[in-house]
Image: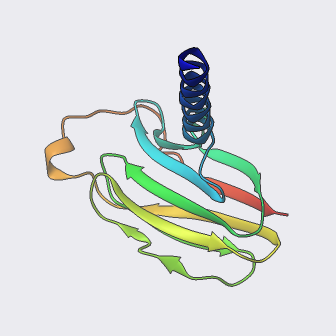
Amino acid sequence: MQRRHKIRGSALALAALAALAVTSAAPAHGTATITIRHQMRGCHSWSFNSGPFKASQSISVKAGTVLRFTNNDVMPHKLVQAAGPKMRLAHPNMIKMASSATVKLTQKGLYRFTTKPGEDYSWAGSMKTSGEDNVLHLTVRVN
């Protein structure tokens, strides 16, 4: 009898651990992250969900997805919608390190985004880059 209780207790503990592992491994439903960073060639680039950093990105997401843009560059960026169904940009002026802007893509269609970078922060004046500054372009297909 006591052995049966230990087996049940162990099975419950394993089931709880498995559920916790599955929950923490799964990405949050309906969210995606775009991160802007500083780099030596081209000044800045962005990444989709921790993928490769590039000046131009093309992604596909489902309707209802929230995109969170995080600015980790050494200059401010203003997020701009260049094309697509009309939408509201929440906090498009990312004026300091780690600031973010969000958009909720509720309508299916093709959206295009870019940023308007500002001047380097005063503390970042010693950071050098080579080549022309990249112009960031993001194309989002919402299915």
Q: Position of residue 128 (x, y in %)?
A: 30, 33
Is residue 28 rendered to the left or right of residue 116?
right
Residue 136 visible? The answer is: no
How is colour applied across the structure in the image?
A: rainbow
Residue 42 visible? The answer is: yes
Q: Residue most toward the front?
A: 1
Is residue 114 rendered to the left or right of residue 123?
right
Q: Quadrant of the N terminus?
A: top right
Q: Which residue is pictured at 82% across the width and 73% down the height? A: 108
Q: Return the residue nearer the eye: 27 or 130.
A: 27
Q: Return the residue nearer the eye: 29 or 128.
A: 29
Please count the marks in the image.
0
Q: Which residue is pictured at 37% across the width and 33% down the height? A: 129
Q: Position of residue 126 (x, y in %)?
A: 19, 35
Q: Residue most toward the top?
A: 3
- The image quadrant of residue 100 is bottom left
Q: Is residue 104 above or below residue 87?
A: above
Q: Residue most toward the left?
A: 123
Is residue 12 rendered to the left or right of residue 74?
right
- The image quadrant of residue 53 is top right
Q: Position of residue 117 (x, y in %)?
A: 41, 59
Q: Which residue is pictured at 30% across the width and 46% down the height? A: 74
Q: Is residue 90 above or below residue 100?
A: below
Q: Position of residue 81 (x, y in %)?
A: 61, 73
Q: Quadrant of the C terminus?
A: bottom right
Q: Return the residue nearer the eye: 94 or 63.
A: 63
Q: Which residue is pictured at 20% across the width and 42% down the height? A: 124
Q: Is residue 66 above or below residue 43?
A: below
